[in-house]
Image: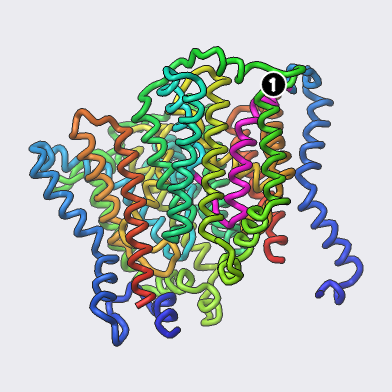
Amino acid sequence: MTMTDVETAPPAGPRHDEPLGATRAERLSALAQQHGALVTLVIAVIAASLSFDTFLTGDNLENMALSSAFLAVVALGMTFVIVTGGIDLSVGSLFALGGVLAAWGSQYGTVVALLLPLAVCGLIGLVNGLLIARSRLAPFIVTLAAMLGARGILLAVTDEGSTTYLVDKSTFFASLGQEKLLGVGVPVWITLALFVLGAVVLRRTRFGQYVYAVGGNEDAAALMGAPVARTKIGVYTVSGLCAGLAGALNAAWLVSGVTILGSGMELEAISAVVIGGTLLTGGFGFISGSLVGVLLLKVIQNVINQIGSLDSAYQQVVSGAFLAVVVIAQTWLGRRRRVL
Amino acid sequence: MSELTLGRAAVDRDRLLRLLQDYGVYLGVAVLLLVNIAFTPHFLSAENFRTQAVQVAPVLIVALGMALAIGSEGVDLSVGSVMALATSLISLYLGYGAWIALIAALVGGVLVGVANGALVAFIGVQPIVATLALMVAGRGLALVLLPQLKDVRDPGLRSLGTGDVLGIPYLVLIAAALALLVAFVVRRTTFGRQLLAIGDSRPAAQLAGLPVRRVLVLVYVLSGALAAVAGVLATARLTASDPTSLGNLMELSAITAVVVGGTPLTGGRVRIGGTVAGAVLIQLLTATLIKHDLPPSWTQIAQAVVIVLAVYAARERGKR
């Protein structure tokens, strides 16, 4: 029983210290769960660069880094939500909405272009959180409704999707997506900075500890005096903010607010987080894993694109099968750790 | 029990709330019908009713399977992709005859259901994630099998999609028959009872010696098969196979119909009558907004509000 208690309510952050008496198999399982994605990524990169001359070229790496950056920011917010044991299906719509609002706002300056999507998407995230935490509605249905609602708002502000707002290339906002720093695109730097910030928040702050506690065992967290409702409201707001910001950065990169983006992005983000080792049952997970998960997904997509004869439909088959394999492995590893 | 200590007014309010939860969806349908009869020109015509009913049929059939999955405290996100897979398989096997094509489509749906069920029941993956994986992979597989839109020129399938008996389209008759069948299964069969018991509490069902795994696999197999039937009927109606767009967002519509119909997401209860009314309600709502020239953005926002309201209303029952 004591083992289970330790399992479901880690004191703070991912456990690196196994309880006394942990067997070798148990330690191996824990290691595989935490670093399996990273090992797979390294193997995938080595295999890809040996098989395709075009893989390790500057252009290809740059493309992969940029296309990973936007998904990674979305996955960052999703990690917080999933660690509390929730799920956020609205991020794809919020990503698209954020991009459109940023492109529209860019005519009034960079501040508006950044603050407007953050405010609107953050507010929708906040409403998600309030409905989930205060009214105790199921996360997946609330965020499903938000996915529809946000897409509706997007259509309403773009004359039913027929207007695409453009970003003036000479503005500072456009340079956020276009410029390079030390040969690497600015969005990539912003993403890396956000991941460092996210990791610090999740592991070193009180809020982060509450996130783990709520995900581990909500009732126990409440009894300990953790502000369960406020923590949940917080994570959905963070997820909304991240999706909105990712959309804004993407709009700066594309210099336009493309209305048809983001569908299926919630699935990609969830897959990345799960592949990165975060448990969907909550209470266990880490920010760096989600970054690895995003990179792994993008490398796989890239490899499939490089095999010219395969069209993008295979990409979906492989992504789905890969997600299934990861989840099976995780469940198996998790069970093993608990049983032993 | 605690009701004994409550005042009379509180009890009445409680009963009213429960009535609203159970029959609110029918009230909603009635209100929308009345509003449309009063304000929408040409609403009261046989032609219009036929159009609405034909449009709602595939959604309803998918929603029936979804109701079973939700009743078992799960969910099936792969239904839209199963529809796409079914339509691809039909085009692929139509050369061998319509019946072979139909069977191939059904087998495809059943196989996806077996995969979902195995992941959920035997491996213990959460239904959302298991069916998410199949949703992504299923759509991809459908596109691998049939990369682009293809016309389906089979007289048998065409008559299935557009024919009728005494003015009632085949599609509507099939949907109604399946609704009755699923209602019977839920209420009168051992499988139905076991399904609800598992939805109520899987550990308790396990302790009681119920064949939990077998029942769960069967739930997802039924959901997959029903989605495949919906895919076949949609293909027959459109006389074309379009694996890119067929069934897109269908999981959303089906979940909405089930939830609006008063089936709690917490499992242990399935309301087939409510699900039928829920599907009709969503269809009427969309039709009303479209007929009054409101843009699609309004339809989506309205649908989102209806979902939240329905879940909010069902919330109290979930606690009981």
Q: Quadrant of the C terminus of chain A?
A: bottom left
Whether residue A323 is visible to the viewer of this picture, yes or no, is yes
Query: Residue A67 appears at what percent x and percent y?
Result: 27, 42
Which quadrant would residue A306 be assigned to in this image? top left
Task: State the SS at label 1.
Answer: strand
Q: Mark 1 — residue? A: B169
In the image, is A247 to the left or to the right of B320? left
Nearer to the camera, B125 or B27: B125
Task: Tell which of B288 and B244 is nearer to you.
Answer: B244
Q: Is residue B61 magenta?
A: yes
Instruction: Tell me which residue sits at (46%, 40%) in the image.
Output: A97
A73 up-or-down from A248: above or below: below
Residue A117 included in the magenta stretch of the image: no
Of residues A119 and B193, the one drawn nearer to the viewer in this rendering: B193
Quadrant of residue B8 in the image?
Answer: bottom right
How far across and down, in percent of the image, does residue B94 sit?
A: 45, 20
**The N terminus of chain A: image quadrant:** bottom left
Q: Main secondary structure of the magenta part?
A: helix
Give above or below for A329 relative to A187: below
**Residue drawn 51% across the image and 23% down it:** B99
Write down the region rendered in magenta.
Answer: B50-77
Image-based side of B45 in relation to A181, left or right: right
Image location of residue B152, percent across then percent down: 48, 16
**Which residue is depicted at the point 24% across and 44% down?**
A300
From the viewer's side, name the closer residue of A262 and A195.
A262
